[in-house]
């Protein structure tokens, strides 16, 4: 989760694409386009609220997080999400928001 957040901050569409499950991910082209059109907000901070499963013997897991964003640090907005991940070929990939 933290690495995907960092990729959003940096605008690294390729990393986001690579860590998104192939059954639910948008095209790399559309991810790149979203960064060029400023559809992706300017992120300020990430707070992990909770996790469930996602341990070494698990095949799935969830991460609840709050990502703050916005140009005005005095009035940030936030994205509060429960993300569902699964292990694919030994690597964790984002599947969907719950």
Image (cartoon, grey):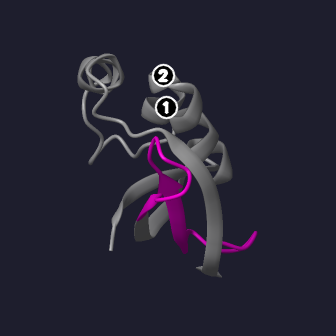
Q: Is residue 56 left or right of residue 88?
A: right
Q: Is residue 75 magenta?
A: yes
Q: Quadrant of residue 39?
A: top left
Quarter of the picture containing the C terminus is bottom left
Q: Secondary structure at mark 1?
A: helix
User: Residue at position x 66%, y 44% from top?
Assistant: 3
Residue 42 position within the rendered picture, expressed as x and y whole percent measured from the top left: 47, 38
In the image shown, does 70 or 87 lie closer to the viewer? 70
Magenta stretch bounds: 54-78
Compared to 94, does 61 lie above or below?
Answer: below
Image coordinates of residue 75 in percent, x first then y, are 46, 59
Mark 2: few, some, or many residues within 10 Å (few <14, many ≥20)? few
Vertical position of residue 81 compared to residue 96: above or below: below
> In the rendered structure, does residue 39 fall within the stretch colored magenta?
no
Q: Name the residue tied to disc 2.
A: 14
In this figure, which residue is indicated by the disc labeled 1? Answer: 18
Q: Quadrant of the N terminus?
A: bottom right
Neighbours of disc 1 within 10 Å: few (<14), some (14-19), many (20+): some
57 left or right, relative to 13 = right
- Res 51 quadrant in image: bottom right
Dot 2 and dot 1 residues touching (CB under 8 Å): yes
Query: In terms of secondary structure, where does tag 2 sit?
Result: helix
Instruction: Locate residue 84, reporting x and y percent.
Output: 44, 68
Residue at the image position 36 percent from the left and 23 percent from the top: 35
What's the residue at 32%, 16% (across, down)?
Answer: 36
Please say if 5 is above or below 55: above
């Amino acid at each position: 989760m933290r690495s995907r957040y960092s990729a959003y901050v940096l605008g690294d569409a390729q990393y986001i694409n690579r860590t998104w499950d192939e059954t639910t991910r948008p095209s790399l082209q559309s991810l790149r386009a979203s960064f060029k059109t400023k559809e992706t907000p300017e992120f300020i901070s990430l707070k992990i609220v909770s996790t469930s499963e996602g341990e070494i013997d698990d095949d799935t897991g969830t991460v609840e997080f709050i990502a703050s964003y916005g140009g005005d640090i005095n009035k940030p907005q936030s994205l509060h999400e429960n993300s569902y991940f699964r292990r694919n070929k030994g690597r964790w990939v984002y599947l969907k928001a719950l």
